[in-house]
Amino acid sequence: MTHKLIAPLTTAALIAAATLATGRPTGAAAAPIAATPAAWTTTATPDAAPAATADTTAAAVQFTAGDLTLTDVTPRLGFAAATDPLSVAGVWQKGITHLAADRDLTAKVTDFQGLDTDRWTLNVTAGGWQQADSGTAAGAAVLNANAHLSVALGDGLVDLQDGVQLGGGATGVTAIAATTVYLDVPAGTAVKAGSYTNVLDWTLAAGPANPA
């Protein structure tokens, strides 16, 4: 019979054995486990602003306003019978019917105001009769009571004493159409000898015509 001698294990031997099994001595603290590396972080850098591909240029202009003017107005007109000179007796007996003046009313309107509402109207109104060099106050009074100056408008005559619109328009130069003035005095009127005048007033106003 064979006997084997088993020697008792010493403390040193046990440590050595443990070291072989675990890779570290018995009783030694375990090596700390390395921490998992933190996740990578990135910082965004803004892209540079793109170069401009479009832009604007301001273009400006300014216009100077003009005027509203009335020119080339008929300076004077008269009444005379070509074959039968006007007389006190003739007016008393036959009167004066639609005697045309020796010239027409004409005028020119220029409008360069440059307004948004560039409109204008032109009116003519007869004043009162007045004595001239050889007339009398009594003769002027007779005419103011009986004589009428008128113009043809539409299908009839319109008394100039009431005022008549002879034109209207807008921007530009407008020639007013020639307009004939007529004199009427009823028969039986005791006119006075002498000469008499009546002033026709032209009024150019900015704005549209009055509704009919």
Image: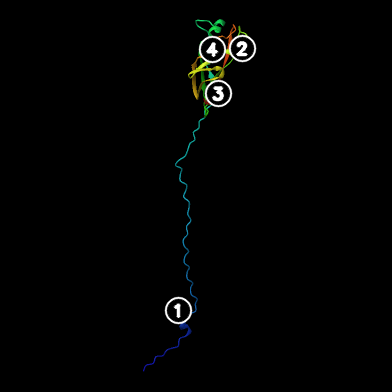
Q: In the image, which is nearer the foreground, mark 1 or mark 4?
A: 4
- At which x and y percent is residue 206? 54, 25
Tell me the amino acid under the disc marked 1: Thr
Q: Residue at x 44, y 77 (%)?
A: 22
Q: Which residue is mark 2?
A: 141
Tag on residue 19?
1
Give how far apart the Cα atoms at labels 4 and 2 are.
Answer: 15 Å
**Around disc 1, counting alpha carbons within 10 Å, would you say few (fewer than 14), some (14 to 19), or many (20 or more)?**
some
> Of marks 1 and 3, which one's residue comes earlier in the chain?
1
- At which x and y percent is residue 107? 51, 17
Tell me the amino acid under the disc marked 2: Ala
Q: In the image, which is nearer the foreground, mark 1 or mark 3?
A: 3
The residue nearer to you, when weighing 99 against 134, is 99
Give how far apart the Cα atoms at labels 1 and 2 are.
Answer: 154 Å
Q: Which residue is mark 3?
A: 205
**Around disc 3, counting alpha carbons within 10 Å, would you say few (fewer than 14), some (14 to 19), or many (20 or more)?**
some
The residue nearer to you, when weighing 195 against 141, is 141
Give how far apart the Cα atoms at labels 1 and 3 are.
Answer: 124 Å
Relative vertical location of residue 138 with respect to residue 15 in this rendering, above or below: above
> Of marks 1 and 2, which one's residue comes earlier in the chain?
1
Name the quarter where the N terminus is drawn.
bottom left
